[in-house]
Amino acid sequence: MALYPLFADLGGREVLVVGGGEVAARKVAALLKAGALVRLHAHAVLHPDIAEALSMGRIIRLGGDFDPAWLDAVWLAVAATDDPAFNAGLAAEAGRRRRFVNVVDDAVLSTFQVPAVVDRAPLVVAISSGGAAPMLARRIREQLEIALGPALGVLAAQFAAHRERIRAQMPDLAARRRWFERMLDGRMEHEYERGGPVALEAAFVAEVERAPDLERMKGVVALVEASEAPDLYTLRALRALNEADVIVLAEDIEEAALEPARRDAQRIRSRGNALECVLEAAASGARIVFMHRLPVDKAARASISASCHQAGIACRVIPAAV
């Protein structure tokens, strides 16, 4: 690993950005979002977002010729100009002062890289190719944007807000770990899809309140339509299959459809009694996937979904492969 990954706390700390165009505007926006005190040097402010931030007093502009002494007051520097000679000089001055510098589109001159980011605050995922293939990092970010839904940020915030209460409710580490696994099994995302952040927060608080009653936890059910081409499963389907403790199979499902599934998950052939199999497994607190085909198993899917909701068991319908 050529780069050492870290997350920098820039809240209330000064950062120098040099440049006034599109690239500089993106850097300034990200730094302001992180709470940094942005100092800007630019011969001309070409981007309206930078002009607006200046007019609102959100950033401070440093006038005149560039002064290397400005680097003494900042934690980081970003060179976002189209002047290679200037960028090289700035990088050298920053190095002499032991300041980290990012020179846009020049990994060699940079001492820190700005990764592609999936922001689900307070959960943040960063991806870097070390400057070797920025488009690859962006492509991976696009894939993760789909896989990591907005509910995760709300869920992470709830974990933080109730940290001490969770520990008080479940002092036993093993019990607490089991509870965390339950909270990450998809039921909270289901609540988010049903009613947004308010529904998720209400469901989370309810789970915290009944946390000690671990033995009576109900399972969670995912209804996944099988595919003839398992490599084309949706990301949600893949996650459900990888997390499943029990996979209940409709009668006509072939083993090939289970290729991406968790290897140690229990497989149960329903043989006409899918509802009974699913509810029995859910009663034990397991994570269950019912693999079916439409339209053959449409009635069974509807019956399972309705029965789960009546029993207070979280149940998600996951679409077929893309």
Image: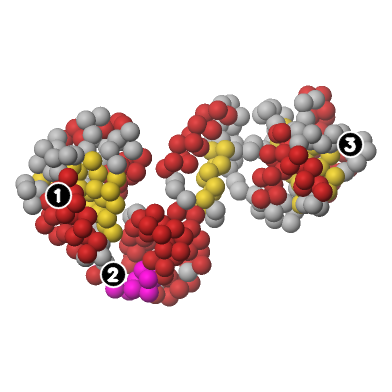
Residue 300 at what x, y percent from top left? Answer: 14, 49
Q: Relative to 214, say whether 297 is above or below.
A: above
Residue 176 at what x, y percent from top left? Answer: 37, 66
Q: Is mark 1 on a helix, strand or loop?
A: helix
Residue under the point 14% across and 48% down: 299
Residue under the point 15% across and 43% down: 297
Q: Residue 66 carries which label?
A: 3
Q: How far apart are marks 2 and 1 (CA)?
A: 29 Å
Q: Relative to 286, say whether 21 is above or below.
A: above
Callout 3 touching callout 1 (CB < 8 Å)? no
Q: Residue 214 carries which label?
A: 2
Residue 290 at what x, y percent from top left? Answer: 20, 48
Residue under the point 29% across and 35% down: 321
Residue 296's image quarter? Answer: top left
Amino acid beneath label 1: Ala
Q: Distance between the residues labelled 3 and 2?
A: 63 Å
Amino acid beneath label 2: Leu
